[in-house]
Image (cartoon, rainbow, N blue to C red):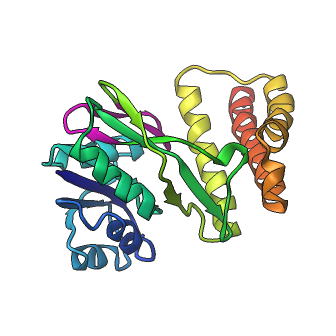
Amino acid sequence: MLTLVVITRDEADRIARCLSSVSWATERIVVDSGSTDETVQIARAAGARVVQTGWPGHVAQKNIALGLATQPWVLSLDADEALSAAASEELLRALRDPHGADGFSFPRCSSWLGKPIRHGRWYPDRKLRVVRRGTGTWVGDDPHDQLTVQGRVTRLTGDILHDPYRDFREHLRTIDRYTRIHAEAMARRGQRAHWWDVALRPPLHFVNAYLLKRGFLDGPSGAALAGLGATHVALKWSRLYFRRES
């Protein structure tokens, strides 16, 4: 009843966990954009169909993957994600009797440096990831994609498990890369940054993540993530601001 689709590039250390978390899927498809490691071989060994393509961007690639599915339902995961055992069992039950739903969403629990984060802006981070084939579309500005569906969405309670960064340096590199991409996308839409965006948005982000959303309950990790989130906001808006000034 279900197709699992995953987009990859150089995910040899993570793709097996992702695929095995939905081992019961009727069909598993990996859309790979030029991996130079063992991603393709590992995916094939796990029983997945691998489609090799170029890289048109996050949103376009995920829509390509969505269009390759042949089963009535499609689950989209990233290579750094996996369904928890509870989410997998819950989804199986829901697909047997969807009660008119056209999509299913899950809370997503991300880990940072090995610690699951349960507060702040990182949780519950609910994601729509299962749609009836033909009803879902990925939208948004790269790299911030979002799956949408025509119809009713049922909220499930089992977690998607997410390991976004292999180490601290990868987190910093991602902030640098994503803020550049996001600032360029904002500029293309005609958005402008003002001095108050640069001055006020970062501390407001920190207060929201650490205090209002109770990031302090995650201890030192909560403080670090609130600070890194504020850094992300500061870089994004600064880059947009200085594009205008240059």
Specify whether residue 134 is in view. yes
Q: Is residue 114 above or below residue 176?
A: below
- Camera-side residue of 243 and 186: 186
Residue at position x 78%, y 47% in the image: 231
Q: Is residue 130 above or below residue 35?
A: above
- Camera-side residue of 137 and 90: 90
Q: Does the stretch in magenta take in 210?
A: no
Residue at position x 58%, y 29% in the image: 186
Specify whether residue 83 is in view. no
Q: Is residue 230 above or below residue 225?
A: above
The quadrant holding residue 53 is bottom left
Q: Magenta: predominant secondary structure element? A: strand
- In the rendered image, the quadrant that contains the C terminus is top right
The quadrant holding residue 4 is bottom left
Give left or right: position of 231 versus 141.
Answer: right
Q: Does the stretch in magenta take in 146?
A: yes
**Image x and y of residue 13, in percent:** 45, 77
> Which residues are the magenta region?
130-148
**Image x and y of residue 181, in percent:** 56, 43
> How many labels were placed on the picture?
0
Residue at position x 78%, y 48% in the image: 215
